[in-house]
Image (tube, rainbow, N blue to C red):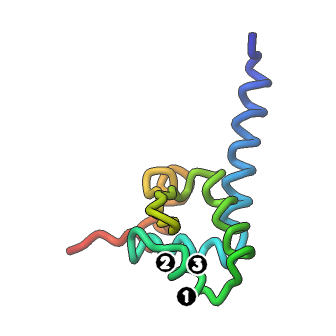
Amino acid sequence: MKTQIDICANNLLNYQEKFKALSDEYRLDILNILSKNGETCVCDLSELLELSQSRLSYHLKILLDADFISVEKEGKWNYYSANPKEIKEILLEDLYFKLYPIDK
């Protein structure tokens, strides 16, 4: 049986993982690109960010583990999308709306 302390510790670890994912400039750039462009091929991300495939994969894995992005495989290519629901849960509304502005 899980105690309240165990549940709190699990929640803290979850937040730690999410804030770690947001603590890097490249990962914030990735989220910005995906939030503006929608589903984007990994090859395009690599070109836009001027990152090697291995370095980009490292950053994408961290964002995937934090559930900030999702991936869909089509043939030999991976296409990534932002997960706005998860992003909104962790970010203040002000910062969220900078990534996902309300169309007027």
Which mark identifies residue 33? 2
Relative placement, left or right, of 78 versus 64 is left
Name the quadrant containing residue 104. bottom left
Name the quadrant containing residue 54. bottom right
Chain-order first, disc 1 or disc 3: 3
Whole-angstrom CA distance, mark 1 to mark 2, is 9 Å
Whole-angstrom CA distance, mark 2 to mark 3, is 6 Å
Residues packed near mark 3 inside 10 Å, few (<14), some (14 to 19) or many (20 plus):
some
Relative placement, left or right, of 27 versus 4 is left
Name the quadrant containing residue 48. bottom right
- Residue occupied by mark 3: 29
Residues at discs 1 and 2 in contact (Cβ within 8 Å): yes
Q: Amino acid at mark 3?
A: Asp
Q: Amino acid at mark 1?
A: Leu
- Residue occupied by mark 1: 48
Where's residue 40, x and y in %? Answer: 45, 73
Relative placement, left or right, of 10 versus 50 is right
Which of the two discs, 1 and 3, sits closer to the camera?
Answer: 1
Where's residue 58, x and y in %? Answer: 73, 67
Chain-order first, disc 1 or disc 2: 2
Q: Amino acid at mark 2?
A: Ile
Regarding mark 1 in the picture, which secondary structure is present there?
Answer: helix
